[in-house]
Amino acid sequence: MSVQAEAIAPRRRFGRTVTKFFSNRSAVVGGLTVLIFVLLAVGAPVFATHDPAQTSFTTIRHAPSPEFWLGTDELGRDVYSRLLYGARASMLAGVISVSIALLVGVPFGLVAGFYGGWVDAAVSRVTEAMLAIPFLILAIALAAFLGPSLSNAMIAIGLSATPIFVRLTRGQALAVKTEDYVEGARAIGLPNLLIITRYIFPNVLPPIVVQATITIATAIIAEASLSFLGLGQQPPSPSWGSMLNTAKNFMSQAPWMSIFPGGAIFLVVLGFNLLGDGLRDALDPRDN
Amino acid sequence: MSGSCGDAGPILEGSHLVKRFGGRRGLLQTEPTVHAVSDVSLAVAAGETFAIVGESGCGKSTLARLLLRLIEPTEGQVFYRGREITSLSAGEMRALRREMQIVFQDPFASLNPRMTIGAIIAEPIRLHGLARGRAVDERVADLLRVVGLRPEYADRYPHEFSGGQRQRIGIARALAGEPKLIIGDEPVSALDVSVQAQVINLLEDLKDRFGLTLVIVAHDLAVIRHMSDRVAVMYLGEVVELSPVDPLFETPLHPYTQALLQAIPVPVPQSREEHDLPRGDIPSPTAPPPGCRFHTRCPHAQARCGEQHPPLEAVGDGRSVACHFWREIQAGGNPPAPAPHGSAKLAQRLELYRAHQARREEEAITTATVE
């Protein structure tokens, strides 16, 4: 028996996760989509054909052409170049604000769900108070309070999205902590911190990953709204949201102004969703 | 097995343990109080197998968790080797947990689905600093072999195993901390019958091999009779009878124990007997009946039973019973239940069969004598 034991190579956990991720076609498509947009955003100065802030009275609302690949906007700026530079603001707004929401919301949710009692009561009341204020109103209030800039907009969006993650994590933690294996962890004398990190957190992760990818989409839109109000990306620097906001005035005259930023948001959100689903499945040791 | 509780004193002792759930929740909310365990005292001797038996909902699993201090008692104390553990700090309690382990009922819920078998078994070893580095892996491999699994399974996840295998993994994890005491909370009731026997035998082997004390919570009387030395019978949160296993099965003293034993299915139809089964359902533990808790269903109940609560009194030979009238019931020859009132047809057939049997025996004797 022991001879057999040496013969069979142990299966590597990390390797299995990677294999599983790459065998999931939609996850790979999602990952590639996100990767392409990240590359475009990072390489914007290289890929851009025009200065994104360069206005021109002679090229107002030109349709897509060999000169302006995706047309021009109401001030004669190249939509393609603005889309590339806007990708930076929008993707940062999406990813960073959701990261803030995760970093704040998940630990609070875990602690509230695991410990219960007055800790839970305190966290839950604050969360509910925040949830009572509409997401965008709260973000606007925070952004106005912090001052108008893209980074402050991200913080505002992140904090506004936090209650969702607190609630979700808390609910999941409440369900997981009644499982026998958590009691088993206490039975061997595992300290609470390790129970939370080894037992509760990995088992509440899947719905959080899915929620996070959905919230990235919401955050990109929220950044657009804040930019529209002058509380996010400051003009003339572009973001997809601010581009859409001006484009909506020219829907019938210059549809390319709204189609391309809108399509970009759609693709990025779809990419993050597919990536999130794929990650969730790949991280789950069950159903190989 | 001798009934004496050992000279070194009990390894685990519960004293007047009470656990109530529910009650006031908030300013305006109250929920019904569940009396899960009511004033239970018992002592487990080192090296014995102690069984706690009762219907579902009688509080036996709650009692097991109270004994391990996995839940805090509402009242009462638990002593482990003479040391009160109910007042220990969280840190002191964690250090002690290495010595007292639990095996759960549901093998599909008791292992963290996100950890490999190796990590699951290694956790208590690392936590209590019993080994380091490569030695941990060796120890895990040893433990897997001890419970009858292949060491190379260490890299797999719980979902890849069957119920019986998972229960073995659960046992390996319980053993990993080198415990003195293992409490099995219905350790085999979720398993197939054939696998049950394997797991029971494994537990018994391990008990002998490592000098463990076992506390088995169960509702399966066959399992109890097979493996335990002493039995506590629980009804609605109370211990109604406490006895060494053989006398309990031969002459049950409490009417509830009698009813439990009569409920064991008899495989041979002819030897089936009319039962004095308890009437009605088990009362709700949110409103346990006054007096003796069993009086609402007891075939021997009298007026006094509804008013006075019978204490658990020692009756000799290491037995205790909580019943006002156990002597009268015993004297009435109750345990051998009333004569069978099978159907008339069955009696007739049996009669024919016996006559036939007798005739054949007679013939056999006569032929034998002729020769």
Image (tube, coloured by chain):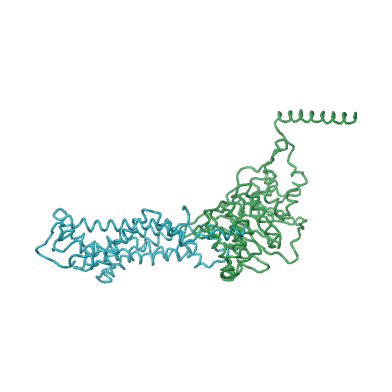
Task: Name the residue nearer the viewer: B101 or A170.
Answer: B101
Give how far across and how far down residue A142 sits, in percent.
29, 68
Quarter where residue B148 is shown: bottom right
Quadrant where the N terminus of chain A sits is: bottom right
Q: Is residue B68 above or below residue B198?
A: below
Relative side of B368 to A239, left or right: right
Give how far across and how far down residue B340 sits, in percent.
73, 36
Give how far across and how far down residue B112 sits, in percent.
52, 59
Task: Name the residue nearer the viewer: A211 or B316.
Answer: A211
Quarter where residue B334 is shown: top right
Relative side of A64 to B14, left or right: left
In the image, which lettered chain appears green? Answer: B
Asked whether residue B88 appears in the rendered view, the answer is: no
Q: Colour of chain A?
A: cyan
Relative side of A201 to B136, left or right: left
Q: Residue furthest right?
A: B370
Task: Name the residue nearer the viewer: B90 or B205.
Answer: B205
Q: Is residue B335 above or below residue B122?
A: above
Asked whether residue B136 appears in the rendered view, the answer is: yes
Relative side of A282 to A88, left or right: right
Q: Which residue is rendered at x = 27% and y = 56% of the image? A: A266
